[in-house]
Image (tube, rainbow, N blue to C red):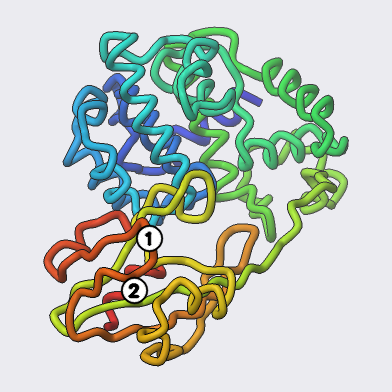
Amino acid sequence: MPNLLLSWYDSHARVLPWRASPGVKPDPYKVWLSEIMLQQTTVAAVKDYFLKFTARWPSVQQLAAADTEDVMRAWAGLGYYARARNLHACAQTVAERHGGRFPATAAELATLPGIGPSTAAAIASFCFSERVAILDGNVKRVLTRALGFGDDLAAGANERALWDRATGLLPDAGLADAMPRYTQGLMDLGATVCLARNPSCLLCPVQPICQAHAQGTPERYPVKTRKLKRTAQSLWLLHAGTADGAVWLHKRPTPGVWAGLFCLPVFDSREQLEAALPLQLRTLLQDDEPFVHVLTHKDLHLHPVRLDLPQQEAALPAGGEWFGAQHWPHLGLPAPVRRLLARR
């Protein structure tokens, strides 16, 4: 399998801003940053954020020295905000404990904040040519199909067994060159050819040895029976503002939805929102059109409630403060809240 994949990768590799040019040693900082951003997020969504981050913070030391609020603000809109907090904590750990240099082994990398086993293996393989296997979603799909691995990956023992099989397939010679190409080739194959639906088997370099193709059932793999149940939640947002464009915002608690970001005050019901205001302000409330914001495993049904004020009132829900029209656009805000404020 390695030879088939390496030959294909040399002529089909994706051009991505975090990948080094041929013959150039990869930058562990850029590889790490891209791997964290790509967790549960598409390449298309990540590219602009990656370029923005590396332009503003070209090194891990500069990111480590950044203000947390600046990092959260730059991340806003990318989602899964725990990644941003872990990203900053990891940068600080690398700067303070490792002299600004990422560890060279997957085992050491996995001890850093926000870096799991597969991400650690990706960095170690790409940047340091360590012979370690990754097992992200695309790679699981490629390997289970090629191997005809039909055991349920919802069971941890089966996933570990697949990881062992993946390790056995790794190149065993010329690792300095082969490991980055092989690992990136697996990822590219899963992202562009071995798709979850309608895989392009005729274009696949490992089709001659793929057991799923031979069976005629590639879409049956991988097998994973346990899925996260999709839920829905209704939230009421107090959209208090003044004629000069100031808005009342507070910082969301951690953990929770939009943790660490500035946000309109959030309530579980219209009644709860009213109860947070003095009586003289409740008669001024106006219900705006509700809308749905879709998260990976949850639909948020958002109900904005406007409170138009002539000036900045002090008696609003505790824990918040007024931000002027020149200030709030530069805060780290959840994407639906930013869109809501922009329409005011």
Q: Quadrant of the C terminus?
A: bottom left
C-alpha span from label 2 to label 1: 24 Å
Q: How many marks?
A: 2
Q: Residues within 10 Å of mark 2 (few under 14, many from 20)?
A: few
Q: Who's the residue at 44% across and 36% down the image? A: 36
Residue nearest the observer in this picture, 208 or 241: 241
Pinpoint residue 324: horizontal percent, then vertical percent: 16, 68
In the image shown, does 155 or 254 lie closer to the viewer? 254
Q: Position of residue 325 (x, y in %)?
A: 15, 71
Task: Tell me what residue is drawn at x 87 percent, y 46 percent.
Answer: 215
Q: Position of residue 319 (x, y in %)?
A: 36, 56
Q: Which numbered disc covers residue 339?
A: 2
Say which quarter of the image contains residue 207: top right
* Quarter of the picture holding the N terminus: top right
Q: Secondary structure at mark 1?
A: loop
Q: Is residue 256 left or right of residue 199?
A: left
Amino acid on which the number 2 mark rests in the picture: Arg
Q: Residues within 10 Å of mark 1 (few under 14, many from 20)?
A: few
Mark 2 or mark 1, earlier in chain: 1
Specify whether 200 is left or right of 119: right
Relative to 73, 43 lies left or right: right
The amino acid type of the residue labelled 1 equals: Ala
Instruction: Confirm or deny contact between disc 2 and disc 1 (CB under 8 A).
Output: no
